[in-house]
Image (cartoon, rainbow, N blue to C red):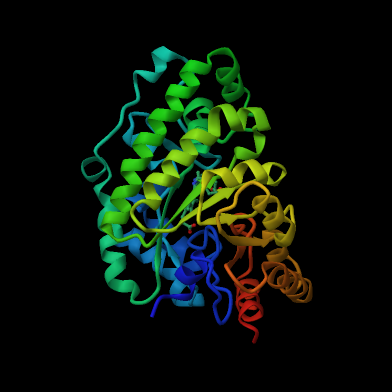
Amino acid sequence: MESIFLAACRGQSTPRPPLWLMRQAGRYLPEYRDVRKQVTFLELCKTPALAVEVTLQPIRRFGFDAAILFSDLLIPLEAMGLPVVFTEAGPSLPDPVRSAEDLKRMAIFDPWERTPFVYETIRVLKDKLGNTPLIGFAGAPFTTATYAIEGKTGKHFVETKKLFHRDPETAHRLLGLIEAATRAYLLAQVAAGAQAIQLFDSWVGVVSPEEWDEFVCGPTQALIAAIKATGVPVIYFPNGATTILDRIARVGADVYSIDWRLPLGEARKRLASGTSAPFAIQGNLDPALLLGPEDGLRKQVAKVLDEGGGKGHIFNLGHGIYPESPIASVEALVRAVRGN
Ligand code: CP3
């Protein structure tokens, strides 16, 4: 029997909405912090035995309906030729790309050769997960490009916007190159056994409708079409961009993951106004509710379930879980979504 997660990705009704959480493997888990004490974050990503272990931790503890590959959005950028370092303050790329000349330092890569640890992790996970489906992922072209251009997590994305408006040709070439590299990287994840793919567009909320049309829509759409051609469902997460959901629906994803800034019913309407294709939705509990008392959490879970409509809805947070989230809150969330 197909899992309730994959059924919901296809828009089918399920006995209850499937549940997983963005960033479900991470620092809110004491068992994750124990593993992290022994290695750096990048070592953790690149050591299959450890990446497998931390991917499985939230499945063991909470029985979530899908596992997500433990890795990072910046792994393909490193493989394309940009060194990446992780500090206490977050990721940093010391040699960012801000001109046509800089772009020469980046290239498409052979994923099996440059990122073999990703595929080994997937292969072992498939063996251990049993009936729980495995989600592979990458950054969407725009969000990945912001890291290449800004050299860190952007605040106002000034360098990105500068490149877009002062040198649009280089911006188009950079996005095209990232799309091509990400495509090969993700097709290999599917070949290795990933059963769904999520594209994180964590910072796309900063683009205007015109920038979306000119720079972002094309490569995102091309990447999604290439993955969908394998038969695996694609989840697209346009964080912070609910104001342009009509345009976003043109990318042709199977599932749209919605942040907490708009009720799911309204999000469905806005998406439907931009496409005649069927789609499912994922989301969208405000992750901050896990920091408050259980009654507030239960009330909002009930609202999200109601807005989700019971068909083609995957329950998730509106963005990643905060490291400060108490385990007891996650347990309460799981009970509330499962109706016990
Ligand atoms: O969801 C999961 O459980 C799978 C693991 C996962 C991580 N990063 C692990 C991680 C996933 C899917 C990502 C994707 C990712 N990485 C995104 C998109 C998702 C989102 O939240 O929008 C982004 C923007 C990145 C880049 C990145 N990696 C940043 C900005 C940071 C620093 C911020 C932070 O949370 O510390 C990371 C580090 C990172 N990625 C950690 C984890 C568990 C923390 C590292 C540690 O253990 O110290």
Horizontal relation, residue 175 to residue 337: left or right: left
Tell me: 217 left or right of 3: right
Res 196 visible: yes
**Image location of residue 119, percent across then percent down:** 27, 54
**Would you say 143 lies left or right of 68 here?**
right
Q: Quadrant of the C terminus?
A: bottom right
Number of marks drawn: 0
Q: Is residue 222 above or below residue 333?
A: above
Q: Residue at x 78, y 71 (%)?
A: 296
Q: Is residue 152 visible?
A: no
Instruction: Report the front residue among 215 and 161.
Output: 215
Q: Residue furthest front?
A: 276
The furthest residue to the bottom: 340
Q: Nearer the viewer, residue 309 or 70?
A: 309
- Residue 173 at x, y percent in the picture: 43, 22
The picture places residue 209, in percent across and down from the top left corner, at 67, 32
- Please state which of residues 114 and 225 is positioned toward the viewer in this rendering: 225
Q: Give the residue displayed 67% in from the left and 68% down from the top.
A: 308
- The answer to whether residue 215 is above or below residue 336 is above
Q: Residue 42: where, in percent of width, then height? A: 38, 46
The residue at the point 50 percent across, 56 percent down is: 254
Q: Quadrant of residue 267?
A: bottom right
| Quarter of the picture holding the N terminus | bottom left
Residue nearest the observer in this picture, 277 or 185: 277
Picture layout, residue 185 above or below residue 213? below
Query: Is residue 280 depicted above or below 339 in this figure?
Result: above
